Image (cartoon, rainbow, N blue to C red):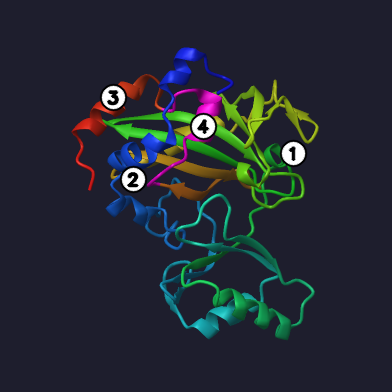
Amino acid sequence: LHLCDRRQRQMCIRDRLYLPLISHALNNYHYTKFFEDKGLLGYLTRSSQLTFPYCYVRCISGECYTNDMRQLDRQKAIMLCEDLDEFIFKISRESSGGHGVQKIVLRGKDQGMRKIILEKLFGESRDFVIQEIITQHPSIAKFNATSINTLRFSTLYLNNCVTIQSIVLRIGQKGAFVDNLGSGGVGVGIKKDGSLNDFGYTYALEKMDSYNGITFKGQIITQIPEILNTILASHIELFPLCNFIGWDVCIDKDNKPVIIEINSSQPGISGQQIHYGPIFGDRTQEVIDYCLQKRVS
């Protein structure tokens, strides 16, 4: 881990310990899995504080619903989408790393071809969402215009105390639509005041001081403090059953934060520790003590 000294490296948590034990003790999967279902995102967690992508169609267990969860006949759902020029198709369960995410462009196609494409999409999975395409704010788009570059906030709510553990900007590869590091992008740590670290890292741990012609040093994402305050308050208000959450947030063209995804069962920590060192920081012993006394079911 490039940004950690030897003592910090020793304190960093390995996936073989985190995934089966720590994450399971912090987040009871019987409850927390429910919150990260993309088909329910923005419905179960309706709040005046948070904005979520608009869903033209939610398909859950093979049944179609509108954005506000009104039942929708499958053929009517397809007809609704036929009028869209472009949208995002996402597998809503058991997907990660950008897998199952597609940008679908129907613009320029006749109704017959649109129906064929939609029939195929609707037959690919019993659990998916069809969402609006979000145009990102220039302050984020400048790092890579083709991908929706997201901010991963990791928050810990334990013993009636909620804290931010890391913030990482994830930038997609030039020409790519998704921002995931595994798809060729780069991650850069961000401080609480919004200033970027001097260096970022690829999935292969290649150290970079710039990307797409933009030098990281001196860059500031001014929206970070306000977004952080909203997320910390929302963790307590909306997700008290989840002790550890990874929030994927983008900033739209109107400069508003939009929650793209909530990782409420096994939020990733490897990428975060590259930039921050031990993910739980000065709360590490507190987390260990909690996990030791918690029965994992």
* Cβ atoms at labels 3 and 4 below 8 Å apart: no
Q: Amino acid at mark 3?
A: Glu
Q: CA distance from mark 1 to mark 4?
A: 22 Å
Residue under label 1: 142
- For the question of whether residue 256 can be seen, the reply is no
Residue under label 4: 272
Q: Secondary structure at mark 4?
A: helix
Residue under label 3: 286
Q: CA distance from mark 3 to mark 2?
A: 20 Å
Of circles 1 and 4, the one toward us is 4
Q: Earlier in the sequence, mark 1 or mark 3?
A: 1
What x and y, as percent, mark residue 64?
A: 46, 76
Q: Amino acid at mark 1?
A: Lys
Q: CA distance from mark 1 to mark 3?
A: 39 Å
Question: Dot 1: within a 10 Å radius of its alpha carbon, few (fewer than 14), some, or many (20 or more) residues?
Answer: some
At a point 54% along the width and 85% down the height, the residue shown is 75
Q: Secondary structure at mark 3?
A: helix
User: Is 229 positioned to the left or the right of 89 in the image?
Assistant: left
Question: Dot 2: within a 10 Å radius of its alpha carbon, few (fewer than 14), some, or many (20 or more) residues?
Answer: some
Q: CA distance from mark 1 to mark 2?
A: 32 Å
Q: Secondary structure at mark 2?
A: loop
What x and y, as percent, mark residue 28?
A: 28, 47
At a point 52% along the width and 65% down the height, the residue shown is 129
At a point 41% along the width and 29% down the height, the residue shown is 13
Residue under label 2: 239
Q: CA distance from mark 3 to mark 4?
A: 19 Å
Give the answer, above or below, for where 257 lies relative to 222.
Answer: below
Q: Earlier in the sequence, mark 1 or mark 2?
A: 1
Q: CA distance from mark 2 to mark 4?
A: 21 Å
Q: Earlier in the sequence, mark 3 or mark 4?
A: 4
